[in-house]
């Protein structure tokens, strides 16, 4: 086991500035090459504290921007039109990529990995889809799956 100071938030491990004990292989092969952590020393502690102050200010700005985007995003409705068969059964499904394309058409550049669908939408109707804009900010987007009129 080796002690490291985290430079960034690492999922399931700790937050920026935390001192954590991890396996040597994890530190050597993952955390250190990606600059996610530094060895514990007095100089590194001061460096991390300085980085933490800067990161907190940046984090506040990012969070407020994400909250503003979430408020704008929750006010819109995404309409996705799909071909349907007998009994209004969809051919295919509506995926997170489809929702991302719909949002892009409305001037929201969102990565499809931030759109959390448990499973693709496979029926007509209105759905609420969570979009994670920030670690602490999630927007709820209305998605209407409609019949494509041919």
Image (cartoon, rainbow, N blue to C red):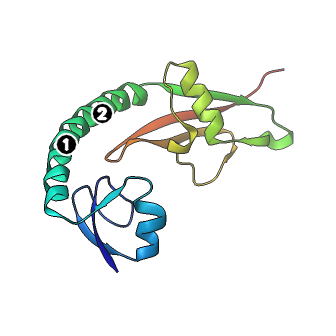
Q: Quadrant of residue 67?
A: top left
Q: Considering the image in quadrants, where does the C terminus appear?
A: top right
From this viewpoint, is residue 90 visible? no
Residue 2: which disc? Answer: none
From the viewer's perspective, tell me whether residue 54 is left or right of residue 14: left
Residue at 25 percent across and 39 percent down: it is: 59
From the viewer's perspective, tell me whether residue 127 is left or right of residue 18: right
Q: Quadrant of residue 53?
A: top left
User: Label 1 vs label 2: CA separation?
Assistant: 16 Å
Q: From what the image shows, is residue 8 above or below residue 130? A: below
Q: From what the image shows, is residue 108 above or below residue 99? A: above
- Write down the residue under mark 2: 67
Residue at 60 percent across and 34 percent down: it is: 99
Q: List x then y, in percent, for residue 136.
A: 31, 47
Q: List x then y, in percent, for residue 71.
A: 34, 29
Q: Quadrant of residue 23?
A: bottom left
From this viewpoint, is residue 17 visible? yes
Helix or strand or loop: what does disc 2 sit on?
Answer: helix
Residue at 29 percent across and 53 percent down: it is: 7
Q: List x then y, in percent, for residue 37.
A: 33, 59
Disc number lying in front (1 or 2): 1
In the foreground, 134 or 88: 134
**How many other residues sit within 10 Å of disc 2, few (<14), some (14-19) or many (≥20)?**
some
Q: List x then y, in percent, for residue 62.
A: 29, 34
Q: How many marks?
A: 2
Helix or strand or loop: what does disc 1 sit on?
Answer: helix
Residue located farthest toward the bottom when viewing the structure as drawn = 1
- Write down the residue under mark 1: 56
**How many other residues sit within 10 Å of disc 1, few (<14), some (14-19) or many (≥20)?**
few
């Amino acid at each position: 086991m080796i002690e490291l100071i985290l430079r960034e938030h690492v999922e399931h491990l700790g937050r920026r500035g935390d001192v954590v004990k991890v396996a040597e292989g994890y530190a050597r092969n993952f955390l250190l090459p990606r600059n996610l952590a530094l060895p514990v020393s007095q100089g590194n502690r001061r460096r991390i504290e300085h980085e933490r102050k800067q990161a907190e200010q940046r984090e506040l700005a990012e969070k407020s921007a994400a909250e503003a985007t979430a408020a704008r995003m929750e006010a819109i409705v995404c309409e996705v039109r799909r071909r349907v068969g007998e009994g209004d059964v969809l051919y295919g499904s509506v995926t997170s990529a489809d929702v991302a394309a719909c949002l892009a058409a409305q001037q929201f550049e969102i990565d499809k990995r931030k759109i959390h669908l448990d499973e693709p939408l496979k029926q007509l109707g209105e759905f609420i889809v969570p979009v994670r804009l920030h670690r602490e900010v999630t927007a709820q987007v209305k998605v209407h799956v409609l019949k494509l009129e041919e």
